[in-house]
Image (spheres, grey):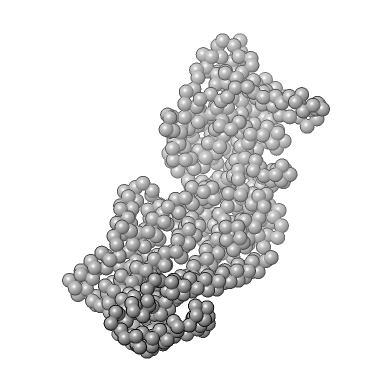
Amino acid sequence: MAISLRNLSVDYSLSQGTAHALRGVSLDIQKGELLGLVGESGSGKSTVAFALMGLLANNAKVTSGTATIDGKSFDLTKRNATAALRGRGMAMIFQDPMLSLNPVFTIGTQLCEVLRRRAPNGDRKTRVAMAEDALDKVKLSNPRRRMNQYPHELSGGMRQRVVIAMALLSEPALLIADEPTTALDVTVEAQIMREIISLRDRIGCAVLLITHSLGLVTEYCDKLSVLYAGERLESGTVREVQRQPGHPYTRMLFDCEVPIDRERHADASENRFTVISGDLPDPRRRPPGCIFNGRCDVSFDECATINPDDYPVGNDAGHSARCLRLRAS
Amino acid sequence: MTRPQRTAAFIASRLASVVLTIAGATLLLFLMVRLVPGDFTSVMLGPRATPELRAQITHDMGLDRSMIEQLWLFASRAATGNFGEDVVSHRPILDIVLDVIPNTLALAFSALALALVAGIPIGVIAALKPGSWLDSGLALLSISFITTPTLVVSVILFLVFAIGLHWLPVAGAGDPGDIMDRLQHLILPSVALALGWVGYISRLVRAALLDTLAELHVRTLRAYGVSEYRIVGLYALKLALVPVVSILGIGLGDLIGSSVVVEIIFARSGIGSLIFNSIAQRNYPVVQACVVFIVAFYIVANLVVDMINALLDPRIAAGRG
């Protein structure tokens, strides 16, 4: 098993109390596999990424969690536990490419800086050649010229390619892509996803794709984990979960996706988008029972008192969900 | 436009504004001196001056001509570097000013260099561990530097190191032919002038660095394992220096202003002491020439500041900064 994350819990201390952002989240990603981590805003999906990288804000505290990467275990409750992996074992692509590069250094300087870490003894010339090659691989036109350009001279999509080139240069075992296309034009989305896939093919790394878009996950990912209010409610292969969602929340998420061929009414107000009514529970006071109970359309009495275990869904061994309806009765 | 063309256009537009600013400042200065109430000659020569002498001075200074004529004479002469002859010493005013300017420039730039060399590292160290004891200690130090007036610092340095310990010379600018002697004479005045700026620059660097360190591109570098020292000392610092350099441009005016005090205490000849003495003698043409030079220096310094900033941040040269 290439990468596993076990029982990750993260608290944020806020002025109004302690928010439990993540509770007992576990993930498994094989080498060469794309795992989509889906959830709505505030579900804690980015917190998973930053806890893995050890780059959480100062008011965050990892209360439990172990990461195993390439056979080595890291106790995430220790700050900087994975510091040695940054830029080597792990690389990350960020949400906003307009802000994720330093505006006063050239693309070349920033790419070569990443290489300093991987090849501390290499000379400048080799690094420049490697960086140029990486820009070429992520299909940025005219890589030699790009090396001497500053981020403001490039478009958002081009800058995201630069960050992907950084990831490529650090040859990670795990690539974390945190909403890599959210800030970009829809037309650029497919190109950027294709570059991420081709990076995976080149290096054979595991990819954790963090997104709110189920469409992106069903199109590109092998496996899917659903995060809700800091808890993982369902996980399995994309095909299985899509065919037979084990959790009502997953089913409702799929219902919210707007199919492209949906029949449209001439009167726009007649068009009904499916929404999940209600809000995320208060992260400072977790209600007893199932975390989704307040918004569930098929809940029953016990849902308010019993916190469900992870039950298998169907016959697929890797598919499970935390819903009392799956209890073998 | 290509990048070199954009840079050339940027420099050309800045140079044009420099010429206009110097012209405007000179006009303002001319009017200010003429519009001051009271008879110029009686202030200069005192109440018991004979009418003949007054008429003589009035004529020598061209004050009997019309304002427009005076302005034209002043501007056309000033443009060629001719500020007229000093009525007291009968030397060309330009020579008097040029004699003392190197002393003042040496003082101002050594103070500036000291302020940067000490202020930037203090700010960087404070920003490495914000909220730590070291940070608080450096904050206290910086703020005491800022709040102690140059006058007090000068007198203390003078009493301790020159008079008490005899480590450094007491007064003057040193033997013009002896570089070591001149440098020794420069130490105390430039420390006195720089101290407040050390505090100011360190606080600015710290604040700008902390702002920059919260930006997302810093997170990218951290995620790729770049060491915190390289992040703070190189990647964040270059960005944080932009506001610091801008403020330095404005601060240079203050530096020249404070040099008046320092030059008088340490009995150095310089533009500060020249202005002070000329005002005491009511020798307005000399004051006027000195101020033209200070204005020019200030504007050129700000031009240099803009260019340094354009070098630091390419977005400024691209007109997006």
Q: Is residue B226 above or below residue A257?
A: below
Q: State the image coordinates of residue B235 (x, y, percent, origin top left).
A: 50, 57
Q: In this orientation, which residue lies closer to the viewer: B317 or A310?
A: B317
In the image, is B124 to the left or to the right of A98?
left
**Residue extending farthest left:** B164
Give the position of the N terminus of chain B as an image quadrant.
bottom right
Tell how many labels.
0
Q: Is residue B262 above or below residue B53?
A: above
**Is any atom of residue B155 visible in this view?**
yes
Please tell me which residue is depicted at 40% across the width and 52% down the height of the picture.
B127
Quadrant of the rendered structure where residue B283 is? bottom left
In the image, is A276 to the left or to the right of A84?
right
**Is any atom of residue B117 visible in this view?**
no
Please tell me which residue is depicted at 35% across the width and 59% down the height of the picture.
B199
Q: Is residue A297 above or below residue B250?
A: above
Q: Is residue A164 above or below residue B113?
A: above
Please tell me which residue is depicted at 64% across the width and 52% down the height of the picture.
A159
Q: In this orientation, which residue lies closer to the viewer: A32 or A169?
A: A169
In the image, is B185 to the left or to the right of A6?
left
Q: State the image coordinates of residue B143 (x, y, percent, origin top left).
A: 32, 55
Q: In this orientation, which residue lies closer to the viewer: B232 or A277?
A: A277
Please tell me which residue is depicted at 44% across the width and 40% down the height of the picture.
A58
